[in-house]
Image (cartoon, rainbow, N blue to C red):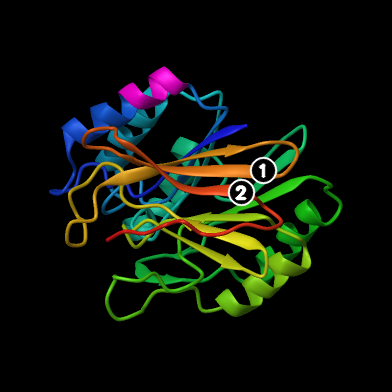
């Protein structure tokens, strides 16, 4: 199963790049992944005209299936209502064969802080508890601090409880965004993969605009590649098993 993990598009902020957007479009058209997971911040301020543009652009992105969750920028200015209008549920579920993705909305209206909430824990448990296969959890906010992003803030208020729940349920892979810095953590055999910003120039230092290309096989082996959106250069970051492996990611 080939998964493209894209985040933080920020259509059409002052940092948004049409060149990067077209590069992303070309890459996905050529690779045609099985699943496109977008982990939030499709828009910059949650305004209607931004949602119209974001929806138009995301419709052009080639993938057999799409799983999309909102970010904190999408929930501004009543944008959380527009998200449902344009993209459907804020808690998307995708299941095919031996892979299941559960997405949740970790945003709060008009604040940058994240929170999943106890009312969503039941949904997460229900969807993952009986599933016997590769389990993937998708949200916008990072559950663990990301190096190189300055003083830590905006981690979901209940991230500890959520991490404990995900580990109890045997979740293999967590996909998130928010900080515009790609990173991989391994916590108690669970891979936590953060994506950078795919289509903006709002980046840290010389860390490039990028997205992740993830291949997951039914035997549990996984490879993660970082794709630089500027030149579509692909760099291998992780290759091993979801049960046991080593992190190869280095940004500097």
**Label at residue 15:** none
Residue 20 figure quarter: top left
Residue extending furthest toward the right: 130
Residues at circles 2 and 1 in contact by the CB criterion of under 8 Å: yes
Return the x and y of residue 244 as percentages of the image width and height: 68, 58
Q: Is residue 15 above or below residue 189?
A: above
Residue 249 magenta = no
Residue 240 is tagged as 2
Residue 210 spot, x, y in % from top left: 31, 45
Residue occupying image coordinates x 17% and y 31%:
19
In this view, the residue in front, 72 or 147, is: 147
**Left or right: residue 142 compared with residue 197:** right
- Mark 2: give few (<14), some (14-19) or many (20+) Cα within 10 Å: some
Whole-percent x, y for residue 25 in the image = 33, 26
Residue drawn 59% across and 59% down? Answer: 191
- Whether residue 188 appears in this view of the structure is yes
Tell me residue 213's x, y (percent). Answer: 46, 38
Range of residues picked out in magenta? 26-31
SS at badge 2: strand
Badge 1 marks a residue whose secondary structure is strand
Residue under the image location 71 percent in, 67 percent down: 167
Label 2 and label 1: CA atoms lie apart by 6 Å
Identify the image quadrant of residue 109. Answer: bottom left
Residue 159, by quadrant, is bottom right
Local crowd size for mark 1, using a 10 Å CA cut-off: few (<14), some (14–19), many (≥20): some
Sequence-first tag of 2 and 1:
1
Q: Is residue 9 visible?
A: no
Q: Disc 1 designates what residue?
A: 221
Image quarter (top left, top right, bottom left or bottom right) of the N terminus: top right
Left or right, 36 with reference to 204: right
Along the viewing direction, whichever of 170 and 46 lies nearer the viewer: 170
């Amino acid at each position: 199963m080939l998964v493209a993990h894209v985040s933080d598009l920020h259509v059409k902020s002052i940092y948004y790049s049409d060149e990067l957007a077209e590069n992303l479009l070309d890459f996905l058209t050529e690779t045609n992944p099985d699943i496109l997971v977008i982990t939030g911040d499709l828009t910059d301020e949650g305004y209607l005209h931004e949602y119209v543009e974001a929806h138009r652009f995301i419709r052009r992105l080639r993938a057999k299936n799409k799983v999309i969750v909102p970010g904190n920028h999408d929930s501004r200015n009543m944008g959380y209502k527009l998200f449902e209008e344009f993209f459907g549920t804020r808690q998307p579920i995708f299941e095919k064969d031996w892979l299941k993705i559960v997405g949740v909305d970790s945003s709060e209206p008009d604040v940058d802080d994240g929170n999943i909430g106890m009312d969503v824990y039941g949904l997460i448990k229900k969807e993952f508890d009986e599933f016997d296969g590769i389990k993937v959890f998708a949200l916008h906010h990072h559950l663990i601090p990301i190096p190189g992003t300055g003083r830590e803030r905006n981690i979901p208020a209940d991230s500890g409880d959520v991490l404990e729940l995900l580990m109890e349920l045997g979740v293999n892979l967590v996909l998130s965004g928010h900080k515009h810095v790609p990173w991989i953590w391994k916590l108690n055999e669970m891979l936590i993969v953060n994506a950078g910003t795919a289509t903006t120039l709002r980046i840290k230092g010389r860390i490039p605009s990028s997205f992740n290309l993830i291949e997951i096989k039914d035997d549990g082996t996984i490879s993660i590649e970082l794709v630089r959106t500027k030149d579509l250069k692909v760099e291998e970051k992780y290759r091993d098993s979801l049960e046991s492996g080593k992190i190869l990611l280095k940004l500097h």
